[in-house]
Structure formats: structure tokens, C-alpha cells
Image (cartoon, grey):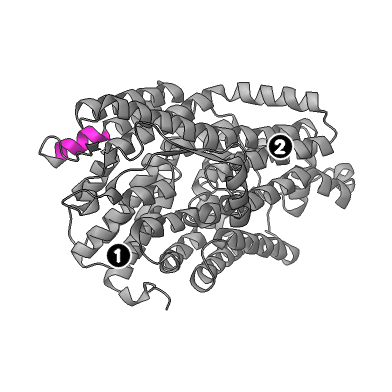
Amino acid sequence: MWTQIYDPFGSWPVSTLVAALPVLVLLGLLASGKANAWVAALAGLVVATAAAVSVFKMPVELAAMAATHGVIFALFRIVWLIVAAVYLYDIAVATGQFEIMKASIARLSGDRRIQAVLVAFSFGAFIEGAAGFGAPVAISAAFLVGLGFKPFQAALLCLIANTAPVAWGAIGTPIRTLSAITGLDVEALSATSGRILPLMSLILPFWLVKSMASWRETFAVWPMLLVVGGSFAGAQFFWSNFVSFELVDIVSAVVSLLAGVALMKVWKPKTEWRFEHDAKLAVDLSTTAAVDASLTPRRVARAWMPFVLLSIAVLAWGLPVVKRTIDAHASWTWNVEGLHLKIYRGEALTGHTVPTDLDREKAIADIVPVASTGTAVFLAAIVGGLLLGLGPISLARMLVATTVRLIPAIVTIVCMLALGFVTKASGMDVVLGLAFTRTNAMLYPILGTLLGWLGVALTGSDTSSNVLFGNLQKVTATKLGLNPILMAAANTTGGVMGKMIDAQSIVVAAAATGEGGNEGKLLKAAILHSIALALLVGMIVWIYAHILPQWVAVPRP
């Protein structure tokens, strides 16, 4: 048995600096552009392991098993999904269906601003609600590339868009987990989050378009941005406050998509905004009469069929009844030998002077070849490919080609997750989090929000951030006389803004768009957006804490 040590030097600033070294090495190498992503990830993993063992006194065997746990998680939950998503996209391109999809979108609107909002924001939110865990960035970014967006721009747009919906991703997993960790009412947490994030949902379509166009060009399509963002925000608030937490993203995404399409029937922008490189496309599908005339409903439906199958599959895989059935018959759990229940969380995190069994860290690896969302995406890809006329041999060859192309990204993701699991098991993440709690009640609503942001930036998951810092938020809020439901909700709502800069999301976006090697540039491009949006969330939380405390949700009777 080993208890996590949070201040090995007896000086929290020094201990915090050492705990930050793996992250500084990883992000520094990425931002420098002098190292490939997999090299940066491997370097961060080496530094994390060395710091955990030599400074925080973590036994070597525990560090090794923590890294192994991360590798297993990466392979089944992330790598499997990314390969499947890119494989589906490759099938659509190889069969020529993406050209028809592109034409159908262009017929609805050839305006790049509108396409970005509908695909990156609304469609991406639907995938986030159904699957989460990297799927929305991978699928939406590949889709935008197919529509003619430059790969780097497509990756950045989808990173920015995949924020406000994340708190309810994967059928409400982050909120459900936050409730389990803190013991706070799940509906109150969801309702409070649904009073913080709708303003961000309203802003995000404008923010997205401004990142690719001027202010004048952005406000030229304000009716579309207001309708899409406003309908999403309204549905998000209503469902999270008056219905339940599981389907918030899916309902909001569908409402915003339908509202956007309906608006296009009665309103069009005065000028259709295009990229400069659009003029260089071999065929401009929006103005080619022959192609447009051939877009019969049957052809369009056939082209969209793989992505319809994708949506149905990931939604079905996320339903609780389906998950329970699959988990009961085709999933296995492994209590990671030598790691499971071998680590005690420290007093600063738990509030317990004497460790209890509840303070022991679980280490359960899920072996989920069927239950993984990646399997649902693979199923959609294979069925779609067969229905589009590809034979088993052709599908197998394409899968091999896709996998080989993604090998650098796979290595990077595996190292990233191993790094994250080592820092979590060693308590270094907690050391960084505790630095945010050394403040007063006036400032803590903002710093507590940034703590959630830091948790997601470090772990790559809003769920993991809630596991890591959820109870710490509750304990600190109680000590400072703040509402624990508000601060727990601040952890998950602030965390979503860190999603666009976590290493995992950066690598996934780069891999899905063919931008491998440009992860550092993506990080530089996204980080200011991430910080600015996180601070906006922090200000909303501060207002609720000190001006409008009565607006924080209370548990339902």
C-alpha cells in the first residue's frame, strides 16, 4: 500500500513546479515544433515516471502498472475509435459518395460560414452526446475536410466547437460521474450546468465564424448564428433543468440542426462567403448544373447512408439498456494486478486524517472489444461499404491502409494516455489542482472553474477531471462558505473549455485531418480561444456565487 504525497519538498510552490514538469515538457516540445507529437508524448511520459518515482516516492511497480493501464484504455477507447472514424471517411471518399454529400450540403448552402456551424457545432454536438471520447472531433473534422475546408482549419474549428456540449457527452457520462464522486444530486448538478453553459452555446457559433472570417463577415450571417446558437442554448437549458441529464446534447443538437435548415428555407445571406482556394477546386458542385440536377433524393440518401448508419449505431451503443446488455455478454474488466486498490488518496484531497477504504484508488481496465464506441463506428463503416458495393477484400485492404497511415498518431495517443495515468496515480495532478485552492472565497469561483479547465487539459476528459477534482471542489467550497453544487458544476463546465487544448484532442484532430506533425501549431492556435472561453465561464460562475446565488439549482424533492 502507498499513500499519495502532495508536498514532498515541504514547499507547495516547489512541489507544484516539479509536478508540472511532465506537462511543461510535453506542451513545450509540441509548441516548439522541433519534435514530432509521438516524441513529445514519449518525453513527457519519461519525465512523469521519473518524477513520480524519484520525487513523489511512488513505487516503480505501481508506476509501471499505471502506464500499462493507460495503454489499455488508449487502445480500446481512443485508438479503436479514431481508426474506425477515419476508415468510415476513407470509404465514403473511395466510393465517390463524399462528392455527392458535398454537393447536397452546397445545395443547401455553399456559404462556408454556415457549413462550419452546422457541421462542427450542431452535428459535432450530436456525436458528442451519443459517443464522446474524441469521436466528434474526428468525425466532424474529417467531414469538413471532405467539404473542402483546409485540414488545419477544419481541425481547429472542430476543437473550438467541441466545448459547450462536452459536459453531457456520451449520454451524460461526465455529469453522472461527478454526482457519483461528490455524492451531490445529479439533477441539481445538471440543472446548474444548464444555467452556466447555455450562454456559451449562444456565443460559440459567432466565435467559430469569427475565427475564420472578419467581424463584418461574421455578423453578415447573424440570423443563422443566432438561430442555431439560440435554439441549441434554449434546448440545453430546458432539457437539463426540466427533463433529465442523459439526452441534453442529442436533443439540443437535433433542435439546432432543424432550426438551421428551416431558416435556410426563408433566409439566405446576401453574399455567399467562400474560401479563396474554392476557386481552384476542379469542380464547383454548388454551381455545376449537371451535378446539381443529378442530386436526386435517392442518390443523396445513398451518399449519406454511411453517416446515417454511424449516427444510429453510436446512439444505440450509448443507450443504457444496450450498454448493459453488451457489458453483460461481451465486455470484461481486469482489476489491474499490483495497482488496483493499492494507492490511498491523501488527506488534502479527501479531507480524511486517517485513510479509509473509500480513499483507495481503483484501477479497473475495461476490455471492451464490442462495447467500445469504435465498434459501433466500425459496424457502420463495414455495413455502409458493403451496401455501397465494396467487397470484403477491398474493405480489408482499405482498413490496413488506414491503420498504417495512422501509426504515428496511434503511438502518440498511447504515450499520451500512459502519461495521464501515471500523473493521476502518482497524485501529481492533485498537486497542480491544490495550487488553485490556496485562495479566498471571493476569487475561488474563477480559480475553481480554471481548476476544472486544467483537469481536462491534463487528462483529456471532462469525466476524468470530475473524478480527479470533483470532491476537492466540494470540500473547498464547503470550507470557503460557497455552494458545493455550484463549484462542482463549475468543475465540469469550466473543464469543457480545456477540451480543445488537451493533447489527446489535438492528436485526434490532427490524425483525422491528415495534419500529423502540426500538433504544435494546432495547440498554439487553440490555446488563446481556450483560455478566453474558460475565463468567461469563470465570470458566469462568479456572478452566481456572489450576486445571484439563488439561481443555483437545488436538489429536486
Secondary structure beneath label 2: helix
Residue where numbered disc 1 is placed: 484
Disc 1 crowd rating (10 Å Cα; few below 14, some 14-19, many 20+) is many
Whether residue 274 appears in this view of the structure is yes
Residue at left offset 40%, top offset 26%: 41
Which portion, as a residue range, is magenta? Answer: 13-20
**Against 276, is 355 above or below?**
below
Residue where numbered disc 2 is placed: 279
Mark 1: amino acid: Pro
**Against 11, is 68 above or below?**
above
Let me know if residue 14 is in the magenta part: yes
**Against 252, is 215 above or below?**
above
Residue at left offset 30%, top offset 45%: 360
Whether residue 31 appears in this view of the structure is no
Marks 2/1 in contact by CB < 8 Å: the verdict is no
Would residue 453 appear left or right of 439 to someone viewing this image? right
The percent coordinates of residue 178 (x first, y second) are 40, 56
The percent coordinates of residue 58 (x first, y second) are 24, 30
The mark that comes first in sequence, 2 or 1, is 2
Would residue 33 appear left or right of 293 to someone viewing this image? left
Mark 2, mark 1: which one is toward the viewer? 1
**Tally of numbered discs:** 2
The percent coordinates of residue 398 (x first, y second) are 72, 25
Q: Residue furthest left?
A: 10
In the rendered structure, find residue 152 and report the number of the disc placed on it: none
Would residue 490 appear left or right of 506 to someone viewing this image? left
Mark 2 vs mark 1, CA separation in Å: 55 Å
Between residue 484 and residue 179, name the one nearer to us. 179
Q: Which quadrant is the N terminus positioned in?
A: top left
Let me know if residue 46 is in the magenta part: no
Query: Magenta region, mostly helix, strand or loop?
Result: helix
Residue at left offset 58%, top offset 34%: 80
